[in-house]
Image: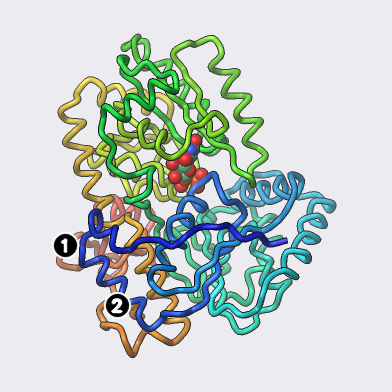
Amino acid sequence: MLQTVDVGMGCLACYELSAGIDAIEQLRELASPLRGCRVLHVNATPYGGGVAEILRSEIPVLRDLGFDAEWKIIGGDQSFFSVTKAIHNGLQGARPMLSTEERTLYLEKFQQNAESLENNYDAIFIHDPQPLPLLQFRGKGNAKWIWRCHIDTSEPNPEMWSFVAPFLGGYDAYVFTLASFVPEGLKGRHVEIIPPAIDPQSPKNMKLDRAFAAGILRWLGMNVEYPFITQVSRFDPWKDPLGVIKAFQLIKKEMPELVLALVGSMALDDPEGWEIYRQVQDAAKNDGSIRIFTNLTGVGNIEVNAFQLLSRVVIQKSLREGFGLVVSEALWKGTPVVAGKAGGIPLQLQDDNGGYLVNSVEECAERTLSILLDPRHAEAMASRGRETVCKRFLLTRLIADELRLLGSLLGLSQRSMPVAQIALPGELRDPVCGMRVDPSTGISLEVRGQKYYFCAPSCREIFERAPGRFEQSS
Ligand code: UDP
C-alpha cells in the first residue's frame, strides 16, 4: 500500500549558484560519515502543499550526497483522506471530532500500509500526522524514527490530541518548525526545531526573465498590462481565500484597475479543497477582476514562479500556518508580501522587512494599498526580505540541519564533524523559533535573571509578549 514517489538524482553542485560554495562544502562534510545510509521519508501526497514541495527537492539532493534516499506516500482513498484532513484540522485547533467509524477506517488503513514497509532502513522520517501510526503498526526494527511535524500544534483540539498522542510513543526525535508548536506532552523528549526551506534551483524559484514570465501569464489569460496581486495556496480555510477577496474589494475602491489572481491547487490528501474551491468561485463570480487559476488547468511550477515574480504584492492571508513556503518563494523573487501573522510566517517576514504582517481584512487591504502606492519603498523592503531568505530559508540549510540530527541519532556525527557544526546540547538557540543564534548580534532580553538571545527583533517581540510560554523550551 505504501507507494514510491519516483524522483531522480539531484545536482548538489548546482546549488553553488544560489547558496554559495560554503554551504555546499558544509553539506558534503556533514554527509560524509553518513554516506550509504538508507533513509526513507513518508508523507501523504506526492503533490500539492509544502511537504511534497520540499521532498521533491530534498530526496534527489540526498542521493547526490551519497544517501540511499527514498520517498513513499501512504495509500488511502477519499474517505481515508477526509479523516486525515480532519485530524490535521483538529491538531491546528478545529472543533469537529472523529466518529467511531472514522477512527476505525483510519486505523484499518494503517495495518495495510505498515505491512508493505520494508525493515532495512537506517532512518525513517514520518511527515505530519497522516502517517504517524506507521511506527506502532510496523514496530521499530533497527531504524531511527523521526516525526517531522509541519503544522501548528500549539493549541490542538484536546480530544484530537488524545487520539493521536498514543501514536507518538517510540519516536527517537520530534522535529517542529517553531518552538511554540511543541505540545506539552513532548516536553523532555528529543525535540529539534528546524524550519522548512525553499529550493532556489527548482523551476518554481529559478530566475526567470520578466518578459518570458509575462508571456507565460498571457498564455494563461492574464492581461499583464494591468497591475495585479496574487495569493498562491491550497484551497484551504486556514489560508483564508475569502478574506483575500474581501481585502481586494476594499483595495479596488482606491485602485479600480487592480486585478486579483487566486492561484490554488488540489492535493491528493485534501478532499476539503473542492468545497473551498467552490466557495471561492461563488464569492468571485460577479467580479471580472478576480481570476482563479489551478493546477488542474496547467498552473505548475513555472507558472507559479511567473505569478510570484510579476505580482505587485503577494498576499498570504493565513489564519493558521505551519510555515508558509509561499512567503519565502515570493521574497526570493524580490516581491513584497503582505501576510497573516500566523505560525512560521513572522520568521520569514517582519514589518518593513519583506512586507507587512496583518491580523485582519482591513489591515491586509491597507498594507497592500500602501505598497502599491509606493513602489520604491516596496522594492527596498522586498530586497531586505530576500536577504533573510538567502541567509535562513534555502534548502541547503534545511538539509544541513537534518544531517546534524541524523548524525547525532545514528551516533555518526561526533567523531567526524567539526564541533561548531553539530547541534550541541546547550548551544545558543532562539527560544521562539529554535534557530541557532549568534550572541554577537546583540538581540537579547533578560528575564528572571536569565539572558535569552534571538535571531531577529520579531522573535524577541513574540517572546516579550508571553515569556512563560518559551522559557522552558530554551
Ligand atoms: N503551490 C503550488 N500551486 C498552487 C498552490 C500552491 O505550486 O496552486 C505550492 C506553493 O508554491 C508552495 C506549496 O504549494 O510551494 C505550499 O506550501 P505552503 O508551505 O505555503 O503551504 P501548505 O500547503 O504546505 O500548507
Quadrant where the image shows the N terminus: bottom right
Secondary structure of the residue carrying numbered label 1: helix
Query: What is the tally of numbered marks visible in this picture?
Result: 2
The answer to whether residue 434 is left or right of residue 118 is left
Quadrant where the image shows the C terminus: bottom left
Compared to residue 255, the image places residue 453 above or below, namely: below
Q: Residue at image x 40%, y 61%?
A: 10
Find disc 1 in the rendering and name its residue: 441
Compared to residue 223, the image places residue 427 above or below, namely: below
Distance between mark 1 and mark 2 Cα atoms: 27 Å
Q: Which mark is residue 391?
A: none
Can I make out residue 469 in this image?
Answer: no
Where in the figure is residue 301, as x and y percent of width and height? 43, 40
Q: Residue at image x 32%, y 23%?
A: 366
Q: Which mark is residue 29?
A: 2
Residue type at mark 2 is Glu
Which residue is nearer to you in this view: 103 or 8? 8
Q: Are marks 1 and 2 in contact (CB under 8 Å)?
A: no
